[in-house]
Image: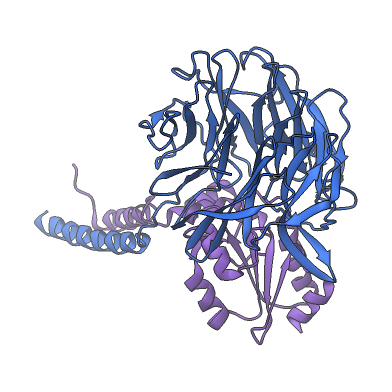
Chain colours: A blue, B purple
Amino acid sequence: MVRRGQAWGRWLLVLTLVLGAAGALAQQPPRAPRPQLATGVAFAPDGRLWLTGLDAQGRLFVQSAPAQDLQAWSAPRLLDTTGDVIAADGENRPKLAFGPHGQVVLSYTQPRARPYTGWIRMLRSMDGGQSFSAPFTVHADRQEITHRFESIAFDAQGVLHTVWIDKRDLEAAPKTGKKSSYRGAAIYRNESRDGGASFGPDTKVADHSCECCRIALAPGADGQLRALWRHVFEPNVRDHAFAALASGAPVLRASFDGWQVDACPHHGPGLALADDGGFHAVWFGIRQEQGEDVAAVRYTRLNADGSPHLHTVRELPDEAAEHADVLAAGARVAVVWRSVEGARSTLRAWLSNDGGQTFRLQVLAQVQGDNDHPRLAQQGERMVVVWRTTQEVQVHELHF
Amino acid sequence: MNCISDSDQGVSRRRLLAAALALPGVCASNQALAQHHHAQTAIKTVADFDAAVWQRLLREGPRPAAYVFTTTYCSTCPAVFELLHDMLRAAKARAELAAVVMDAQGERALVHAHHYRGVTRLYAFNGFEPEIRHAVDPKWRNVTPYVVLLDRQGRDQRVIGPPDAARLKAWLA
């Protein structure tokens, strides 16, 4: 028995060494987890600036800063999302919107187990954000397919609109081999007339949207919301389409880059109401100019129906510009973007006092390392840019 | 009687050793993850990708090679792998066909490997995505698939979306 015990001891020693060696092989240098910095920002009716995002552990939080000192962020407050995984990277991000009667809604895309799938989830507050409901799914369709890249906003009547990219039509379309006969995805929406307590049916805004770009929303002069998104026009042109969020509203083409590509730009547009009832728009695209592919973020003016003033199209003065967004108040227009060169990221603003006829360029900040796209918020004449980095949340007030 | 015979001991030791080596956390957990999701994929490991890795691959990586930069949300990307895989089969050619996943880190990229037909190696960005992308091509604005074709001499062709027939022919010439 003693000899057997010694033999076992030797085996255990060998086993320990093998396990240790295998464990050492498995233990590569630890990777720093990639920060998920994508955030949503909005002004509350009382002038506080709110932000929502994920913390280092992937937990949803909100924090806010008082109107008189937008740098004085409150401590992050964690929200219970019942274990939802939340997309918060690039153009996927949590968002929040304030309604007219103390309602606050907070939305995000919850990736599902199958690739390219997601559900749009929402938390709702009826007390100005002091407390939030458990998350619930916004759309009626519960297939495990794409419902992603949602945008949310209240219109002037206090109706909450949710708009998203949806692949139910692609899934239902006949296939040629493994390939669907359906071009791109679709834009769907619904409405809530009680601040997110209940929702109307899912309705289609347009067939054939691009699959993974954010949707821009802005109120028109009538207070009704308009949407601008990257579309897949026949045969395979990834330009932009515009529509009012109303039953039967026509879909108009808003950009004419003519970019034919089987690819995912992951680079959605920006939209803001202009003082003449039209719109300011920014978008990324590649167009042929003198035989060359020219990639750029471009700005243009749109008519009230979404058709472009083609003579107003111009490139932003930064060939590295990415994920630009736009705000406007009267004749003041702000186009803001990030550009990355090596380890350095630069936040730039292009500011106009004459309705977008002329602009001046301003560098707002530079940082090293991970950072989010710039997020814009507006309350009346007040416009701010919020930029989250791994170190801090910067707030830049725009002065014209 | 708790004692076991020598012969029993041998069998039990081998079983114990085999079981120990199969313990999660000892074997690469990414392998288990990939097998759990899609047993058919041959890719069981993922390598980190950053600017230094890219420079090394350009300098001394396999030839010919295709690097398809992709994202987990890119539904147009799998078609490029099918195109390249079918082209290689038709030409009876061998080449590195690497997927470089930009938005999933480490083992998380493995669950998407089954979308990448014919893929021979899987990389995942490790670091700030725009910074790595800038190192690959300063003019590339994260449109995917972004394809780099390296021919036998290491000359590169870069294209957004599926490469056309002329580029593919030049790649394997």
Q: Image check: A21 left or right of A91?
A: left
Q: Which of B62 and B130 is in front in this view?
A: B130
Q: Image check: A37 left or right of A155?
A: left
Where does the image place residue B28, in percent across and percent down from the top left? 42, 57
Tell me, yes or no, if residue A128 can be seen here: yes
Where does the image place residue B115, in percent across and percent down from the top left? 66, 54
- Number of numbered markers: 0
Where does the image place residue A155, in percent across and percent down from the top left? 69, 22
Q: Residue at x 72, y 49 (%)?
A: A283
Where does the image place residue B172, in percent across and percent down from the top left? 74, 81
Residue A102 sits in which quadrant?
top right
Q: Which of A376 and B144 is in front in this view?
A: A376
Q: Residue at x 53, y 41 (%)?
A: A88
Asked if residue A57 is positioned above or below residue B102 in the image, the reply reads: above
Q: Nearer the viewer, residue A117 or A197?
A: A197
Q: Residue at x 55, y 43 (%)?
A: A399
Residue A182 sits in which quadrant?
top right
Tell me, yes or no, if residue A231 can be seen here: no
Q: Quadrant of the C terminus of chain A?
A: top right
Q: Image check: A307 left or right of A338?
A: right
Asked if residue A299 is positioned above or below residue A317 in the image, the reply reads: above
Residue A334 sits in which quadrant?
top right
In the image, farthest residue toward the bottom: B153
Asked if residue A30 is positioned above or below residue B137 in the image, the reply reads: above
